[in-house]
Image (cartoon, rainbow, N blue to C red):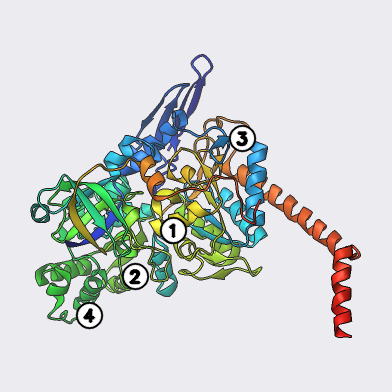
Amino acid sequence: MDIILNTGGTAFQGAVIKGGRKFTDEYTKEAAYCDINPTDFEELGKPWFVKLTNDLGDSVILRAKKTDRQQRGEVFVPRGPWANIIVTPVTESTGSPAYKNLKIQIEKANGPVLGPEELMKKYYTKRTSGQVAGGE
Amino acid sequence: MSSEAQESQISNKITCSDVTCPVCGISCDDIDVELDDVSVVTRNACIMGDAKFKELRSPHRILTPLINGKEAPWSEAIDKAAEILVNAKRPFFFVGSETSTEAMGVAIEIAETVGGLVDGNATICHGPTVMAIQDVGQAGCTLGETRNRADLDIYWGANPEDAHPRHLSRHSIFVRGFFAEQGRKGRQIIVVDPRRSTTAEHADLHLQLKPGTDFEVLNAIMTILNGFEPHESFTEVTGISREDIHKAAQMVEDARFGVIWVGLGIASTRGKHYNASMAMRLTQLGNNYGKFVILANRGHCNVAGFNEVLAWSCGFPYAVDFSTGEPRYQPGEYSTVDALRRKEVDALFCMCADLGAHLPKKAVERLAEIPVVSIETAEGPQAFISNVVLPGVLDAMECEGTFYRMDNVPIYARSFCDPPFDFTKSNEDTCKQLLDAVQQKLAAREKAEGEEAARPKTLSEEEFGQRLDKLLSRV
């Protein structure tokens, strides 16, 4: 299903990151979910989990939450590494990427939702060989 | 306002009042803190502020420098960080916002010294709003004026109930002010947001627009104020009824002192700085009826400070490139996401920000490919993608410094305890030590290059033979 993604901060997600608990299950609880309008939630087949995919082919699995705070055709994901898997780097020459109003696809999926450390390891392989710019 | 600090030698307990909170853009300056060897108790702090103060006794705190995930001596980490920045051809400096302007100033100096690019949290936050200020101009005021005078608060793409939890009780909806003595009863509230946010629940009028139609809705209010009717397609395009848009225009017209609080709903959505420009034009128009101002709900305690420091350092608010020896400004080219996405950055210095968590995947992928130096307080995505981690100091707690509040008023935040290590006193101190190391390496390189240039060139036997063969072949 085509849908519009809005991301943004919440007080609870903010409390987790300000408190330095960024590699804990609390972060997963407060930032790895997707708010969905009740009608869209029914059309998706009352999912426990959803997979969000952007036009670049990047996708992430999140917990599905039914809420009437959302209008039909729109979903909300809290700010964080999960949302940013699918946020695209298009800045319209301002520096600010597409954190809001981004067309994506949503579908019913199975879990699990990755924790923050597992998510980083899956999507970003950090070079830790000690190499530095200019060679060493 | 009075502030007190008491210390008991027996329990090692510190009690302070009127402490400045180093979290969101309203930089609350009325926090009470009780600190002992094992715990932190706060009063007046919101859920986010309380969490940050509890970092003083957190098990997640990074206390030792790290090189490639392994503990290292401080001097070695500083040396490694300097080596990375000096050896890079296109180093990038991301100056985060939960630290002092004093630290920012030194970080910018390092960038200028090595000819790097500089950017800060504004770029992924209210950068477009800053661009709009350059385009249109901002009629602003202080938070004290909104508290004491405003009778109309418009939250446009902003949800302070979540992002600035004490905003409503200290500076807008609920507070009783000198000329707004009735508090909530004397204020009208408009919330413009596609979500029914928690802030929207307090609204007299919630304009639940379709995402990406801020420009059209702002334009429609201005059209009505100018005596015309919005286009017949208005409701179909924006999802807002004609009755509601007329009601909003009437509220603007009736206001004695109106405030538009713009959030990232304007800056991060399609249209970006054009949306913010239109909000500033509506503010100008509102001044035909009463007093009207516009303020950006800045997310961090000193994100406005970064724009201030960079602007007074080199004339531009963010997205600056020093590689030519003089500052050049170009959002979209020298800004963080764009420069990383194009993979032109080959090393990054990040101070007090979590780019690993808050940049789009395509930008973080580049961070994983290049050496990254971070000043960071806790383990998490930023520490994960960093090669060198320099432990951060908590401003307004362990060191003093200046924050620029969201209304651009500078607040001097005092400290009340020492950092849990002795190799640095503040993030400013860390940056100064790094600057010294960078300058030493550059001086050593310059000296070596000078000696190399002055040395008479002698050829090896093999090189001599090759050149001789070449000459003979011409004969």
Image coordinates of residue B29 in percent, x first then y, are: 42, 41
Q: Quadrant of the N terminus of chain B?
A: top left
Q: Looking at the image, tell me whether mark 2 or mark 3 is earlier in sequence order.
A: 3
Label 2 Cα neighbours within 10 Å, binned few <14 / some 14-19 / many ≥20: many
Q: Earlier in the sequence, mark 4 or mark 2?
A: 4
Q: Nearer the viewer, mark 2 or mark 3?
A: 3
For the residues labelled 2 and 3, the Cα–Cα distance comes to 50 Å
Q: Which residue is mark 2?
A: B280
Instruction: Check disc 3 and give the amino acid type.
Output: Ala
Could you tell which of marks 1 and 2 lies nearer the N-terminus? 2
Are tags 3 and 1 found on a single chain? yes
Residue B226's mark? 4
Q: In the rendered view, does A42 fall on the left or right side of B85?
A: left
Q: Earlier in the sequence, mark 1 or mark 4?
A: 4
- CB-based contact (under 8 Å), mark 1 and mark 4: no
Separation of residues labelled 1 and 2 (CA atoms): 31 Å
Q: Is residue A48 left or right of residue B91?
A: left
Q: How many marks?
A: 4
